[in-house]
Amino acid sequence: MKLLDVEIAENKMIANGIYLLSFESDYLAKTFKPGNFVNILVEKDSIYPLLRRPFSISFVKENKVFIGYKVVGIGTQILSRKKKGDTINILGPLGNSFLIERFDGKVAVVGGGVGIFPLLSLCHELKKAGNEVDVFLGFRSKSDLFFVDEFEKVSDNLFISTDDGSIGFKGNTVEFFKTKIAEGNYKVAFSCGPKPMLSAIKSLNLPFKCYVSLEEKMACGIGACLCCSIKGKEDNMLHVCSDGPVFDIMEVEI
Ligand code: FES
């Protein structure tokens, strides 16, 4: 983990309120593993906003790092106004990473909304390891779609769901995933998305392992402030930033 000043290469809107930021960093591109995140100080020379904001790394290409994000508050609003050549300060890579190996069966990857961001590099690495990967992505509507072409390239089957049915399956992506479990011969699942979605996956009591990347409000990003604490299955306290963000779904309360 390092503190780095990086110069923005590009920061563009790719869907409704969704941006893709990129910058060059040999260090991050070499050390990053799917699931890792970075903590960004969006206003480097100001004390406001004071706290860093956590962002998962979506993917890297050579020495370029790409971070997808949604504008949800003041920190991401400020970030969305940054231009090519502006400098931001990054702490990372942080957190643990997804388990990647050649699994003895198919792999299911289930993402919803902004939870889709960390799953692209995961799929890339799962394919590289020789896996057959089914991807299930959920969006609100057709106009909210992003990364679809990129996921096409790193999956064997890509299933899109939208809440309004404007494209793909109409309804919740977990409902659609559920219809595929019996025929899927899945050995493992990976997921990231809003808590109700993860909770719905947990309640499926999947007959195989499922790993989830959790999102929590964070401050320090290194296990020092308790800001991101959650309960483990033994009522134990876990830090999403330093024990996670990736957990076995059965080991955490969701
Ligand atoms: Fe401070 Fe996790 S963000 S302990």
Image (spheres, rainbow, N blue to C red):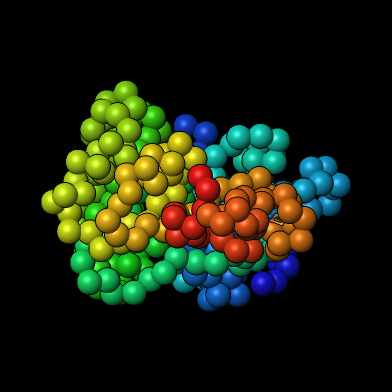
Q: Residue at x 25, y 68 (%)?
A: 131
Q: Quadrant of ligand 1?
A: bottom right
Q: Residue at x 17, y 59 (%)?
A: 185
Q: Residue at x 38, y 39 (%)?
A: 200
Q: Position of residue 92 (x, y in %)?
A: 65, 66
Q: Residue furthest front?
A: 234
Viewer-side residue, 74 vs 235: 235
Badge count: 0
Q: Residue at x 40, y 52 (%)?
A: 191
Q: Residue furthest top?
A: 164
Q: Is residue 219 left or right of residue 153?
A: right
Q: Position of residue 26 (x, y in %)?
A: 58, 74
- Vertical comparison of 222 with 104: above or below: above
Which quadrant is the N terminus positioned in? bottom right
Viewer-side residue, 147 vs 212: 212
Q: Is residue 109 left or right of residue 184?
A: right
Q: Position of residue 197 (x, y in %)?
A: 42, 39
Q: Position of residue 135 (x, y in %)?
A: 28, 51
- Vertical comparison of 48 with 222: above or below: above
Q: Is residue 251 left or right of residue 89?
A: left
Viewer-side residue, 235 vs 231: 235
